[in-house]
Image: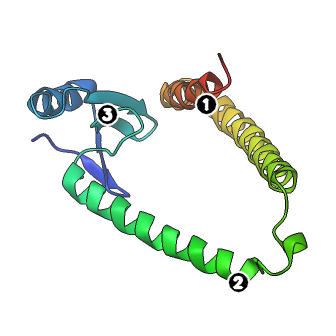
């Protein structure tokens, strides 16, 4: 495979050609493989919203399964400690949970807006860098996926 720089487990290639070569080698096993442009370089992703090269999907699925089991146990423990079934007032309502989640989502949106403003400031200092455009392209894809949830 081509030379790349590894950052947080993701291989970033210095040019599109090198990333495309890796993509071509992976296409038979991973038909949805794609190349994504980031500020750090070109990355090869096994599938949209999935892990990046060189991580093996098998190790990814094992890690996800163990995290799921950990999360499931934590949720069970929290439920046992938070809910006293002998007192129906302690259970809460769907409305309580909904509005708490709504506040959490609104907080995440504020953080996203702040992050975009910081990103724009960085771009203004380096406006010839196409990496920032790639960053926004990735953010747009993710937001489009989320927005699609609300469309009929």
Label 1 packing within 10 angstroms: few (<14), some (14-19), many (20+): few
Q: Earlier in the sequence, mark 2 or mark 3?
A: 3
Indicate the position of residue 137 as horizontal and vertical percent values: 53, 24
User: Compared with residue 105, is residue 43 higher up or lower down, i.e. above or below?
Assistant: above
Asked if 111 appears above or below 29 in the picture, the reply is below
**Residue 125's spot in the image, x, y percent?**
65, 34
Furthest-front residue in this view: 86
Q: Which mark is residue 127?
A: none
* Pointer 2 local density, CA inside 10 Å: few below 14, some 14–19, many at least 20: few
| Residue at the image point whose x is 25% and y is 30% from the top | 33
* Residue under the point 49% across and 24% down: 130
Disc number placed over residue 47 in the picture, else none: 3
List x then y, in percent, for residue 22.
15, 33
Query: Which colouring convention does the figure follow?
Result: rainbow
Judged from the image, the secondary structure of the residue bearing numbered disc 1 is helix
**SS at mark 2 in the image:** helix
| Spatial CA span between label 1 and label 2 | 33 Å
Q: Secondary structure at mark 3?
A: loop
Determine which residue is flagged by label 2. 81
Question: Which one is closest to the eye, mark 1 or mark 2?
Answer: 2
* Pair 2/3: label in front: 2
Q: Real-space Cα distance between discs 1 and 3?
A: 17 Å
Please name the residue that numbered disc 1 is placed on: 146
């Amino acid at each position: 495979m081509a030379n790349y720089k590894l950052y947080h487990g993701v291989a970033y290639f210095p040019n599109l050609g090198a990333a495309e070569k890796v993509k071509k080698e992976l296409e038979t096993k991973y038909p949805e493989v794609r190349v994504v442009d980031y500020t750090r370089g070109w990355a090869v992703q096994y599938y949209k919203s999935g892990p990046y090269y060189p991580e093996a999907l098998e190790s990814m699925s094992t890690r996800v399964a163990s995290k799921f089991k950990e999360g499931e146990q934590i949720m069970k423990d929290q439920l046992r400690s938070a809910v006293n079934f002998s007192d129906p007032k302690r259970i809460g309502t769907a409305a309580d949970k909904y509005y708490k989640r709504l506040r959490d989502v609104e907080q995440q949106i504020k953080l996203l807006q702040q992050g975009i403003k910081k990103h724009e400031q960085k771009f203004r200092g380096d406006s010839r860098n196409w990496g920032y455009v790639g960053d926004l392209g990735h953010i747009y894809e993710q937001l489009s996926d989320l927005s699609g949830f609300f469309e009929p």
